[in-house]
Image (cartoon, rainbow, N blue to C red):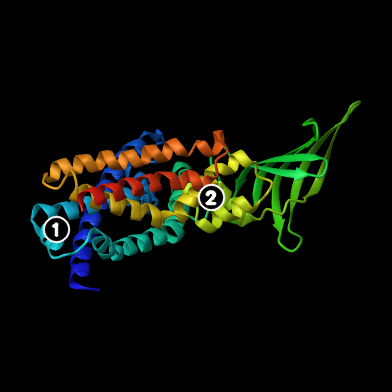
Amino acid sequence: MTLLDRYLTRQCVIAIATVVGVLAALTLLFALIEELDEGNANYGFSQALQYLLLTMPRRIEELLSYGVFIGLLLALGNLAEGGELTAIRAAGVSPRRIIVALLPTLGICLALNLALSEFLSPAGERAGVQSKQQALLGQPIGASAVSFITPKDGIWLRRSLDNGSEFAHIGGIDQQSRLVNVHVYQVNALNQLVASRQADSGNFDANKKQWLLQNVATTALSDRAIESFEEATWVWANSVNPDQLATQAFSDPRKMTVVQIWQYLSRTEQHPIASIPFELTLWQKVLTPLTYLSMALMALAVVIGPLRHTGIGQRLTIGLFIGLGFKYLQDLFAPMAVVFNVPSVLAVMIPALIYLAVAQRMIRNNA
């Protein structure tokens, strides 16, 4: 690494850390106000703050791409304002070489993003949700009492059968992998309900890869009769395991790791339309290097182009608009995966490719 690389890396990392820190503080403030509207006497300021601090890694992960762009814009803009960028260019350093000098900074940001996305964020999200649920129930934080890790509306599963489909709703799954309040509905090829079952609880048999439900009330429907009966136990031949259900409990793909999203998509029983948000999030995580590169190239293009002689206030304002523009492009092309049946990877790549093309053209015109 040359002297130029080290200098640019130091300036850019400091600027990115400052921007992400400010954005994270603002996000924490607004989220704290929203959490305090829960209206639960057991869920006060300290409980809400603990929940937000535990889930902060996910929020920082979401802010990092915008922090990279605005941080690079401010760092390079300060160099241009002080004449240092002009001196670098006068010394024969091309814009392409400056991009190469920014690669260590992007590598540090990618390493941080990987640590947040795959390790800190999922663990913090799980701990935060459990602490919030315990607070809402009036339990001491970290108590050994059973704490269910399911969302308020439970978990829905769909599975294809030889002669129809099966839909299941799970009311809760606790830390011991025990299911409670399970409803299983079976429909035929004509989508007509043929059987429904309600079970009080269920446990997973890892050897046979199936569930054993207890206290099951069954209703079987046919063309001529309806039969109801009760069973002490019933074998539910669904191979989805407790780990997958625990992941499904946090079914927001932004809160899942790449491996967890891949496992979710590998279950062919999921409806294709329901899988699209997970595909989009998967490719957004995988293509993070392309996003960072497009942001870095755009920051350099703006600094050596239209904002070469502007102050920090104008650069910050323009940077916010450009960052919002990238988000709006993502929100614009994401529905294309559903409406026009566009591959999710292409819907994710288009905004980054647009920014890359525009930045390259700006750099070429101002080189």
Residue that appears at 43% across and 35% down: 332
Mark 2 vs mark 1: give the one in front: 1
| Residue 19 is at least partly visible in this image | no
The residue at which mark 2 appears reads as 147
Q: Secondary structure at mark 1?
A: helix
Near mark 2 (Cα within 10 A), the count class, few <14, some 14-19 or many ≥20, is: some
Distance of mark 2 from mark 1, alpha carbons? 56 Å
Tag 1 or tag 2, which sits nearer the N-term?
1
Q: Is residue 6 above or below residue 275?
A: below
Residue 59 spot, x, y in % from top left? 36, 48
In the figure, residue 259 lies in which quadrant?
A: bottom right
Judge left or right: residue 177 versus residue 336. right
Q: Secondary structure at mark 2?
A: loop
Label at residue 85: 1
Answer whether labels 2 and 1 touch (C-beta < 8 Å).
no
Image coordinates of residue 85 in percent, x first then y, are 14, 58
In the image, is 272 to the left or to the right of 335?
right
Q: Is residue 353 visible?
A: yes
Mark 1 residue crowding within 10 angstroms, few (<14) / some (14–19) / many (20+): many
The three-letter amino acid code for the residue at tag 1 is Leu
Q: Position of residue 341 (x, y in %)?
A: 58, 38
The residue positioned 29% from the left and 54% from the top of the image is: 296
The type of residue carrying mark 2 is: Ser
Residue at (22, 59) in percent of width and height: 12
In the image, 245 versus 340, the foreground residue is 340
